[in-house]
Amino acid sequence: MAELNPTLLMVYAGLFGAVLGSFLNVVIHRLPRQLEAETQAWLREQTGQPRLETKPYNLAWPASHCPQCERPLPWFHNLPVLSWLALRGRSACCNTPIAKRYPLVEGLMALLTMGLVQRFGVGPEAGALIMLTGFLLALGAIDAEWQLLPDPLTLPLLWLGLLGAMAGLTPAPTVESAVLGAALGYLSLWSLYWGHRLLTKREGMGYGDFKLLAAGGAWLGWMALPQVALLAAASGLVFALTAKLRGRLAPQEPLPFGPFLATAIWLTAFFGVR
Ligand SMILES: [Zn+2]
């Protein structure tokens, strides 16, 4: 294979990352709504209410449309980052503000993909880590907005980590370390949760957090767990204190832990255990 110009390689990596980020935005927008609709349908069935005739709604249907007026988007208003900037953050059809999350997720995914290709080169290892990055970004964004880490994301991420360890493509040093990492990651937060709950009668975390740390342990190996937990707890604490000091966080407002866990897992995957 001919040697690729390093600058051109970074441009390709950035474009690839932006396109992935654009797909992540679809997942981030649709998956929680889809799960909520399924729960509502299940509740109606349990209570014997008639089924609602709703349109199917999933990751592939309907095509990209304005969430406000539901008009379909032309392809040139659907370009990562560029369209948001060109439209100045408002939809062309009805002038509705478009969430900053769209360009943020696309831009961040582009940057992280460039960083991974720079550090790990082009190959299956970088490919695996780009996949990990996509899952973590989607999980962090969904948890920040919905206080929810959906099983359809955390569980595949966990077994992809175990399979990746078998193929030798993940940072976990051995398959044994990955299996232990998954079990200990889950158990550590589970025991913390029950300890905290028995002592204070309050819930500090959710089961999604246990599954996410289990997935992190599967990808990184059990020896990375203390670093991940410490990084996540410290950054979460700093964030909560700053938000409180600036009056941005109400006293009983719960702070989702997922974004901090996701960040800590990513940093440890990228820089290794220090
Ligand atoms: Zn519109």
Image: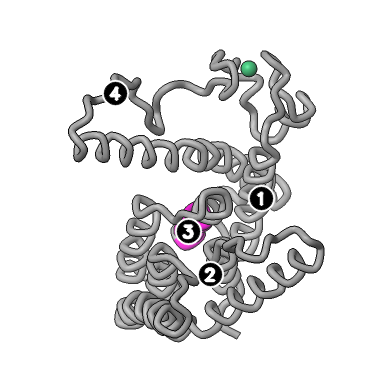
Residue shown at 58% from the left, 54% from the top: 144
Q: Does any portion of residue 1 appear in the rendered image?
A: no
Q: Name the secondary structure under disc 3.
A: helix
Does label 3 or label 2 sit earlier along the sequence?
3
Is residue 183 one of those drawn in magenta? Answer: no
Does label 2 or label 4 sit earlier along the sequence?
4
Q: Does any portion of residue 258 appear in the rendered image?
A: yes
Amino acid at circle 2: Ile
Amino acid at circle 4: Leu
Pointer 3: what residue? Answer: 132
Q: Which residues are magenta?
A: 125-136
Few, some or many residues within 10 Å of mark 3 (<14, 14–19, 20+) = many
Q: Residues under labels 2 and 1: Cα distance?
A: 16 Å
| Dot label at residue 265 | 2
Residue shown at 37% from the left, 41% from the top: 35
In the image, residue 79 lies at what x, y percent? 64, 28
In the image, residue 253 lies at what x, y percent? 61, 61
Does label 4 or label 1 sit earlier along the sequence?
4
Is the residue 61 above or below the residue 35 in the image?
above
| Dot label at residue 52 | 4
